[in-house]
Amino acid sequence: MPFCPQCRYEYRAGLRQCPDCGAELVNELLPEEQLPPSGPLVTIYTAQDMTEASLVKSFLEEFQIESFIGYDAGSAYPVGQIEVRVAEAHADEARELIAEFLSAPPEDPTL
Ligand SMILES: [Zn+2]
């Protein structure tokens, strides 16, 4: 049976679009916990540059935590400090992971 991903409502077979919101129907709904986090973003880390911010972002992705990189939108490209933000629901977990990440000894001692 098709479902609307927006309304989470089940429709009869044959429908392709949600009559309520117009979204394309899907065959299966993802479980709640697999939905992208919504709600306010909080800054959990301030990086010194884009390289560091990307590193933190990809590290968090390994733990299925979606993160967003924020910087002064007025500049053409990121300059200065870069903020790494996650959904509020993941903030505590992300902070702990980053603290561990930063305190871990480097994997390659020659670096
Ligand atoms: Zn709908």
Image (cartoon, rainbow, N blue to C red):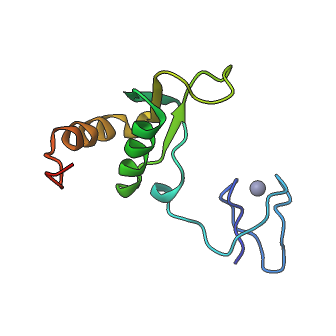
Q: Is residue 14 left or right of residue 48?
A: right
Q: Percent x, y for residue 33?
A: 45, 56
Q: Image quadrant for the N terminus? A: bottom right
Q: Nearer the viewer, residue 83 or 64?
A: 83
**Residue at horizontal 68 percent and vertical 59 percent from the top:** 5
Q: Is residue 9 left or right of residue 31?
A: right
Q: In the figure, 62 relative to 53: above or below?
A: below
Q: In what quadrant does ligand 1 lie?
A: bottom right
**Residue at horizontal 52 percent and vertical 39 percent from the top:** 68
Q: Is residue 3 left or right of residue 94?
A: right
Q: In the figure, 53 relative to 66: above or below?
A: above
**Residue at horizontal 44 percent and vertical 30 percent from the top:** 49
Q: Nearer the viewer, residue 27 or 75?
A: 75
Task: Tell me the quarter of the picture where residue 4 sits.
Answer: bottom right
Task: Tell me the quarter of the picture where residue 93 sits.
Answer: top left
Q: Percent x, y for residue 47?
A: 39, 29
Label tally: 0
